Image (cartoon, helix red, strand yellow):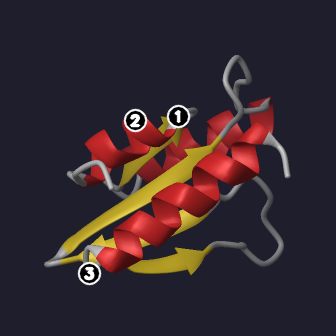
């Protein structure tokens, strides 16, 4: 398992333990969807997980911008467990 998968797995596990609903995202007929959707207490957060030093590709950048601008959604790029915790307001496990 690579660094990106380890970050995603840890953040998802800790978020679920904190009461977040966690969903894997995939858009039909559209590429570039963020990796996960987190929902709790009326807040919806979309997260794209990347390994440290990696950036979203151009298609992901366009899709993320569309979700932020056109839909008003909260979209984050997380490269570390600490950043994922910060975005979701999680305490270190």
Marks 2 and 1 sit apart, C-alpha to C-alpha, by 5 Å
In the figure, is residue 18 to the left or right of 12?
A: left
In the figure, is residue 62 to the left or right of 64?
A: right
Q: Residues within 10 Å of mark 1 (few under 14, many from 20)?
A: many
Q: Is residue 41 above or below residue 55?
A: below
Q: Residue, x 78% and y 64% (percent of image)?
A: 30
Residue at the disc numbered 2: 83
Residue at the disc numbered 3: 19
Label 3 residue SS: loop
Q: Residues within 10 Å of mark 2 (few under 14, many from 20)?
A: some
Q: Is residue 49 above or below residue 79?
A: below
Instruction: Pinpoint residue 21: horizontal percent, then vertical percent.
Output: 38, 82
Comparing 75 with 19, the one in front is: 19
Q: Which label number is shown at residue 80?
A: 1
Q: Is residue 57 above or below residue 71?
A: above
Comparing 74 with 17, the one in front is: 17
Q: Look at the numbered discs 2 and 1 and tell me whether their residues touch, using CB distance below 8 Å.
A: yes
Of mark 3 and mark 2, the one earlier in the sequence is 3
The quadrant in which residue 79 appears is: top right
Q: Residues within 10 Å of mark 3 (few under 14, many from 20)?
A: few
The quadrant in which residue 64 appears is: top right
Q: Look at the numbered discs 3 and 1 and tell me whether their residues touch, using CB distance below 8 Å.
A: no
């Amino acid at each position: 398992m690579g660094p990106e998968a380890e970050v995603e797995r840890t953040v998802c596990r800790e978020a679920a333990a904190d009461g977040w609903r966690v969903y894997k995202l995939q858009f039909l007929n559209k590429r570039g969807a963020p990796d996960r959707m987190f929902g709790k207490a009326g807040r919806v957060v979309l997260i794209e997980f990347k390994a440290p030093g990696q950036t979203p590709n151009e298609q992901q950048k366009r899709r993320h911008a569309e979700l932020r601008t056109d839909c008003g959604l909260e979209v984050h790029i997380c490269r570390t467990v600490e950043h994922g915790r910060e975005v979701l307001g999680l305490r270190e496990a």
